[in-house]
Image (cartoon, rainbow, N blue to C red):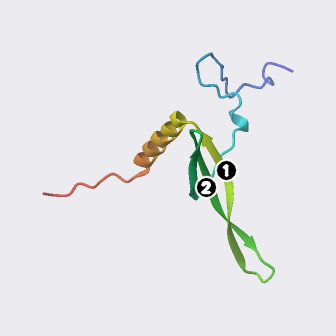
Amino acid sequence: MTEKDTPVPVEAIPSVQGGLSGLASAHAPFLYFENAPAFGTMNGIIKVTLTATRDLPQANNKIASDHVVVAHLRMNMAAARALKAALEGAILLASPSPTDTPN
C-alpha cells in the first residue's frame, strides 16, 4: 500500500479521564418517540416510558395504527434535572422568536 492509498482517519476521539468520550457512541441508540404517557418514581429513581405510533399494512389494503413502547428511561434525580434542562434548552432553540409588535 502506498502513501496515496493509505486511508485517512475521519475522526480521532481521544478518551481522557473526566472528559466526554465518543468512542462507544457509534453503538448508542437514537431514540425517536412521540409521547411519554407513563412516568413515576421508585426508590428515588425517575422512570419514564416513551412510545411511538406504528403503521401496519393490512390485507385489505388499509393501514392499521397502534402504539408501541420504544424505551424505558431510568435515571437518578440529578440526571432527570439535566435531561429537563437539555429539553428546555432545545425547545427554546426550536421555538420561533417573537415578532416585534409596534406599540
The N terminus appears in which quarter of the rendering? top right
Q: Give the image quarter of residue 69.
A: bottom right
Q: Which mark is residue 71?
A: 1
Q: Which residue is mark 2?
A: 33
User: Is the C terminus in the top left, top right, bottom left or bottom right quadrant?
Assistant: bottom left
The image shows residue 58, relative to residue 72, as above or below, that is below
Residue 17, relative to residue 75: is it above or below?
Answer: above
Q: Amino acid at mark 2?
A: Phe
Disc marking residue 36: none
The percent coordinates of residue 32 (x first, y second) are 62, 53
Residue occupying the far bottom of the picture: 60
Relative to 55, is 61 above or below? below
Residue located at (57% from left, 45% from top) = 41
Name the mark nearer the viewer: 1 or 2: 1
Give residue 79's quadrant in the image.
top right
Residue occupying image coordinates x 65% and y 28%: 22
